[in-house]
Amino acid sequence: MREMGSIVRFLLGITCAAVLGCTGQITDGGGTGDEQPGEVTLEITSPADGASFVRESVGSQGELVAALNLQVETSGPIAGLRVESASGADLGELSLAELNTIVELDVDGGHTLTVVAVDANGGAVATESVSVTVSAPAAASCHEWLDLYNLSYELGPTRQGVSDPVTVTTPINGIVHRYSANDTPRDTFFMDCSLALSLARAASHLRRRDIIELVDMGVYNYRCIGGGTPPDCPNGISQHAYAKGIDIAGFTTSDGEYYSVNDDWVIDPDSEPTCAAPTEAGKDEFLHELICDIKADGIWNIVLTPNFNAAHRNHFHVDLTTGSNFIESRANAPRRRRTAVGGVSVRRLHP
Ligand SMILES: [Zn+2]
């Protein structure tokens, strides 16, 4: 689950350039000035109060963040430092050796960071705050967005229907991609630039859940919705014809566990919207929360799950249909029934 409020993470131990050095040793009067022994001073030397930052770095979970170098100078007898946000959330404890660290901010707007020096009992002995402003990046083109996410890609090759073709070297923002029929991952992945960007954005939702691999059933296929070859498409042209849709069969977490749309997604009743439906604990809940969080983040315009129809029993179809915003069950979803077993509601598919 996403943390509440400002999300701040510390990449601990990155550098050790604090004024007090790397040992964390502090002696009375050993600071920068001529304070009296026992007096504690605390100064935030970076970032400057009122400074502005753009979310143009890829953060530890694959999201775009403003990466602030937080530097603090202290003197006097302190036992540790802690950083708090304006909301009052305790964002973590820093040891004395971590007076120079990176703070990641992934929420736009104003932030107040407060550093508190504490004594051996955890009591505050000195406090200092800085206010900073974080804003979203403004890339001029899809290719620039891919660059922001540090994706490795080549332009092309030219394919019918694909307006901005790219061939991306995988992993994509930390996520391995594998075609479902293969045992080994893809080395490269052909798609429209806009779909590559959407996969880069989706990666943070996956990585927060410890997912390391996305298993797909394909992207580019120059075809109509329901089959046939464009332009004669009674039901419209598939987003796969534009390489702007991907069929997702499942996900693998770092412990080797596989979450299969076909085997683990429990189809919801027609009366329950996909993202409001009760779920079964375990993999069904995991898959529901994942795809609904991604949908809520606006990464894909259309998300079809096994709730949609029998043709989607074994995958999530997600795409970038312009002007669409859709995820829900449909009346033509496969029939299912609920069977009460020992007071527990169990759902089963008809064969
Ligand atoms: Zn599809």
Image (tube, rainbow, N blue to C red):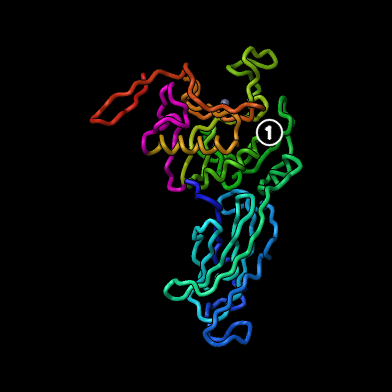
Q: Is residue 259 magenta?
A: yes
Q: Name above or below for residue 216 compared with residue 15.
A: above
Q: Nearer the viewer, residue 95 or 198?
A: 95
At label 1, the amino acid type is: Asp
| Residue tagged 1 | 192
Residue 65 image point, x, y percent: 63, 52
Q: Is residue 152 magenta?
A: no
- Rendered image quadrant of residue 277: top left
- Counting labels gives 1
Q: Residues within 10 Å of mark 1 (few under 14, many from 20)?
A: many
Quarter of image, ligand 1: top right
Residue 137 image point, x, y percent: 70, 48
Q: Residue at x 53, y 73 (%)?
A: 96
Residue 84 image point, x, y percent: 53, 62
Q: Residue at x 68, y 12 (%)?
A: 232
- Rendered image quadrant of residue 324: top right
Secondary structure that dominates the magenta span: loop
Q: Nearer the viewer, residue 103 or 237?
A: 103
* First to last magenta residue range: 254-281
Q: Name above or below for residue 288 compared with residue 340.
A: below
Location of the C terminus by quadrant is: top left
Q: Name above or below for residue 82 compared with residue 186.
A: below
Q: Is residue 158 left or right of residue 35?
A: right
Residue 39 image point, x, y percent: 54, 83
Q: Residue at x 58, y 39 (%)?
A: 186
Q: What is the residue that sits farthest to the right in this orientation?
A: 140
Q: Nearer the viewer, residue 58 or 7?
A: 7
Circle 1 — which element?
A: strand
Q: Is residue 232 left or right of residue 307?
A: right
Q: Is residue 321 left or right of residue 91?
A: right
Q: What is the residue that sits farthest to the left in this orientation?
A: 342
